[in-house]
Amino acid sequence: MSINIAIDGPAGAGKSTIARIVSAQLGYIYVDTGALYRAIALYIKENNITDENIPSSLKNADVSIKFIDGRQRVFLGDRDVSDIIRTPEISMEASRTSAIPSVREYLFGTQQKIARENNVIMDGRDIGTVVLPDADVKIFLTASAEERAVRRYKELADKPNCPCYEEILSDIIERDKNDMNRPVAPLKQADDAVLVDTTNLTLEQSADKIIKIITEKTKR
C-alpha cells in the first residue's frame, strides 16, 4: 500500500524545493501539483481561451507529467514547459484558473492516480484538504510574506526581466488573498496537518524538520 505525504502552503514558501529534497532522501516520487495548474494557465493564455470556453477546451490541453532522471517534468503535448511556466505572469494566471471547478476536476484524477500507484510527496494548496484527505502525513509549510518575496527574488534575479522585490512581494500578498478566498478548495491548513514555519530556517533545516516529522509518523 502506497504512502502519501501532503505538503500545502502559500506561494513562495519553498514547498517544491523542500519536497524535492525530502522525496530524494526518502525515495518517494515528488509531485508538484502547482506545475500542472501552471501548465493549464499557459495553455489558456497561449490559446487566448476565454473563461466561458475553458471547460470545453480542456479536452485538448493534453497536460502530463513525466519523471526524467528522477525529476518531474511537465508537458503540454510533446513540449516540455517545465521552465516557461515559472514566470510571475503565469503564476498569477495559475492562481486565478486554479479556482475554476472544471480545471480542478480535469487535474484531480491525474493527481489521485499517481498517489494510488506510488509512495508520493505531493505539494500544492489543497492536497491535505481535498486531493489526498487521507494522506498518511500532512504538513502545512509557510513563511512570512517578506521572507517568501526575498527567496523568490533570489530565484529570479539572474533571469531576464526579473521583477523588483516590491513587485514580487505585492504579487505574493495578492496571490495569498486570492488562494485563501477562492470559493473552490481555498488554501487552508488541514485540521490534522503539522504547521512548519520556515521563516527563520535554512533550506537544509526545513528539509530535516520535515523528514523527522514524516519518519516519526510513518515509522519508516
Image (cartoon, helix red, strand yellow):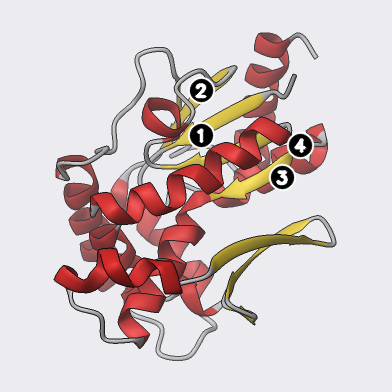
Question: Which one is earlier in the sequence, the residue at label 2 or at label 3?
Answer: 3
Is the Cβ of the residue at disc 4 closer than 8 Å to that at disc 3?
no
Q: Which residue is mark 2?
A: 138
Q: Which residue is mark 1?
A: 7
Dot 3 amino acid type: Ile
**Between marks 4 and 3, how big is the CA–CA gap?**
10 Å
Instruction: Please report the residue visible at 33 percent of the width from the left and 63 percent of the height from the top.
Output: 94
Q: Relative to 189, is 217 above or below?
A: above
Answer with left or right where residue 67 lies relative to residue 40: right
Is the Cβ of the residue at disc 1 closer than 8 Å to that at disc 2?
yes
Q: Which residue is mark 4?
A: 28
**Between marks 2 and 4, how big is the CA–CA gap?**
15 Å
**Between marks 1 and 3, how big is the CA–CA gap?**
13 Å
Answer with left or right where residue 85 lies relative to residue 114: left
Q: Depth check: give the residue in front, 32 or 149.
A: 32
Dot 2 amino acid type: Lys
Q: Which residue is mark 3?
A: 21
Question: Which one is earlier in the sequence, the residue at label 4 or at label 3?
Answer: 3
